[in-house]
Image: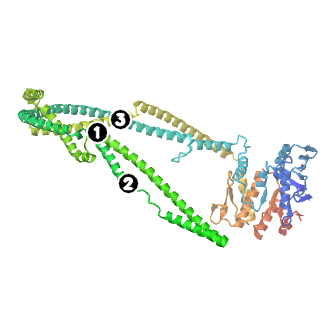
Amino acid sequence: MVVTQLEMIRFKRFLNRKIVLVPGLNIIRGPNESGKSTMKLALTAALFGNPTSSSEAVRNLTTWGQTERCELRLEFHDEQGVVFQLRKDFAGGKIFMLRDQESLQSYKGIQNQIAEILGIPTEELFNLCTSLDVRSLANLGTQAERKNVGKMLAGLMTGTTGSGQDVLQAIKKLDEALRDLGRGERQAAVKNPGPLKAAKDLLLQLKGRLLDAREKLRLKEERMVALEKLRLEHKQTKERLEGLRHLLDANQQLVQATKRKDELIALDRDFDQRAQILSKLEHEYQTLEQALAENPLARFSPEKIENLRSYYNVMRQKENRASVPPAQNALIPWLVGGGVGLGIFGLIMIYLHGITGFLFFAGAMGILLAAGIAYRTEKEKIKQFQVRQEQEQAEWTAIEQKISVEMKDAPGMKVEEVFQVWPAVQQQLADRKAVEKQLASAKTAVAEEHWQSVRRDLRLQEDKLQDAGMAALALPADALAIRQREAQRLETEVRELSSQISKCEGILEHSQIHQDAVTELEEQIAEGQMRLEYLEGQEKLLQLTRDLLDQARRQTLHPAQKILEKRAGELMATMSRGKYTNIAVDDEDLSSKILIMETGRWESPSVLSQGAFDQFFLSVRLALAEVLTQGRKTPLLLDEPLAAFDPMRAQAAMECLRLLSRERQILFFTCRPDYDQAADQVVFLE
């Protein structure tokens, strides 16, 4: 493809500019801000822009200050010499292309025709492959863009279109399936493991659970055997303890019978002595009864005494607080006498001196007023005193009445005498109660019924001691002590055995493991093993299929990769004057390496100097453009690609570009006049 004419109407800085181009190397030269990048953008927009789009990017193409959108006209011919005239009216949203005498007005049809001529389907790939500048030599767009270019290169290498029949894509899908199937196998823990890893993990988990279940079942069976042993031992120990307890109980009864017999014999001997004690207690009781009957305070209760004491204390307090009448104010007569005298003196002064005498008279009236106020205050105090006296007298009378009520059972006695005599009366009452209790006990001990009961109990104890069966169980004291210690030991053993049995029963009760659970786990392990074998078979089948496809792909590869590497090496050899001749390029991510002749090793281009680095990537990009366009002579748009080259490298690069321009059109945008002598045409922009 060769562009022969570009016309820009209302396109950014160009209001109306027509540029004629020729085959070969076209130098478009101008200072900064002269429109070189605008012309490059216009070529891209003419080839790929959509006039019907209302995007912000399309609106920004219009010349500043113009209300009507831009229009682009492009004239070019293909490699067979067929002339095309392309017109894109962004103002009217129209597109038109004339090929010889045939016209096209469908955007999709026109873009398909342009893609066929260029050999590049999209604007993005056009910019990546054929539009180069100094900033993008070593940067082939984003990772996704590199993958896209790599996919095109792989299509050329395998001879496929990438529409589902691509063997490389099939191999990738098989690799993905293998990765998904075995995801996480080399990791101890992974969030989303593959089926194979999940099956192995599940099988391992089930085996661990089976071992744990078998161990728990074994422990359960051991505990059940131990429980039966504990129960048997507990039964035997308890039987021994019961026999020993029977022996100890019999000896205890014998000891108690002997002790009771001795007590009863002592009671029998002390009967006469107790009868004398009873007579003495009866006399003492009668004496206390007679003394209390003659004393009226014996009928008083402690509560009544406390009430009397309370009333008596209140009366004494009131006596101590007897009201004192208020003292008479001795100042009042003096105030009255002074006020009257001063008033008479004031009247005399009024008569003699007129108005001056009024001051004395007013003073006299003030003194008399103060005397009146003092007299009234004194009268009020006297009245309050009288009221208080009446209240106290009423309270005194009420207390006297209460004391009289309480003292009605002790006529002729004063309250003070009651308080003095009451402690002795209290002591007599306490003595009578104690003697009464002793008397009751003595009467019980001496009573005939009690005596007969003692005799019956004595015969009963003697019969028990003479019983042959009880006598046979009798043990000496030292043997009895040994049997008691043995009984204590057996009781401790029974308690410990009971505790162990309860603990063992609790553990067995909470044990959830059964033989059915073990059988179920064994069945799950068998199923998991079958599942794992199936997945491993699937993995082997996928791997075999992938290896066969890869082997077939390698046997049918087209030499596109070799062509790319060979062409890049040739261009690099030309630009480096033969210093570097071999370049290797990956077909998927386009990563590349260069052979260092001095060491004989393949290295990353990052080890090169900056100048050699730029030469390397310019060579790769130019070679990539040739390979991806599949032999089509697509124009190259170069925007200051040699800005970082020194003069010697720039000259070598221009010689290389000059050779390329014999086969394809090159538009070289620059602001430097150094390259004009190599150009087939120089276009000046101001």
Residue at image position (8%, 37%) is: 476
* Badge 1 or badge 3: first in the primary sequence: 1
Q: In this rendering, would 444 be left or right of 527?
A: left
Q: Nearer the viewer, residue 252 or 612?
A: 252
Instruction: Report which residue position mark 3 lands on.
Output: 506
Under mark 1, the amino acid is Lys
Instruction: Report which residue position mark 1 lands on.
Output: 408
Distance, label 1 to label 3, CA atoms, is 79 Å
Task: Say which element carries label 3.
Answer: helix
Under mark 2, the amino acid is Arg
Residue at image position (25%, 44%) is: 413
Q: Whole-percent x and y of residue 566?
A: 72, 56
Distance, label 2 to label 3, CA atoms, is 82 Å
- Report crowding for label 3: few under 14, some 14 to 19, many 20 or more residues within 10 A (C-alpha): few
Residue 147 seen anywhere in this rendered image of the structure: yes
Q: Nearer the viewer, mark 1 or mark 3?
A: 1
**Quadrant of the frame with the C terminus:** bottom right
* Badge 2 or badge 3: first in the primary sequence: 2
Q: Whole-percent x and y of residue 109?
A: 85, 43
Residue at image position (42%, 48%) is: 390
Q: Nearer the viewer, mark 2 or mark 3?
A: 2
Task: Say which element carries label 1.
Answer: helix
Q: Nearer the viewer, residue 636 or 686?
A: 686
Residue at image position (23%, 39%) is: 296
Q: Nearer the viewer, residue 384 or 536?
A: 384
Picture quarter containing residue 662? bottom right
Distance, label 2 to label 1, CA atoms, is 28 Å
Instruction: Residue 321: give its label.
Output: 2
Residue 6 seen anywhere in this rendered image of the structure: no
Instruction: Residue 18: give its label.
Output: none
Q: Whole-percent x and y of residue 620?
A: 73, 58
Under mark 3, the amino acid is Gly
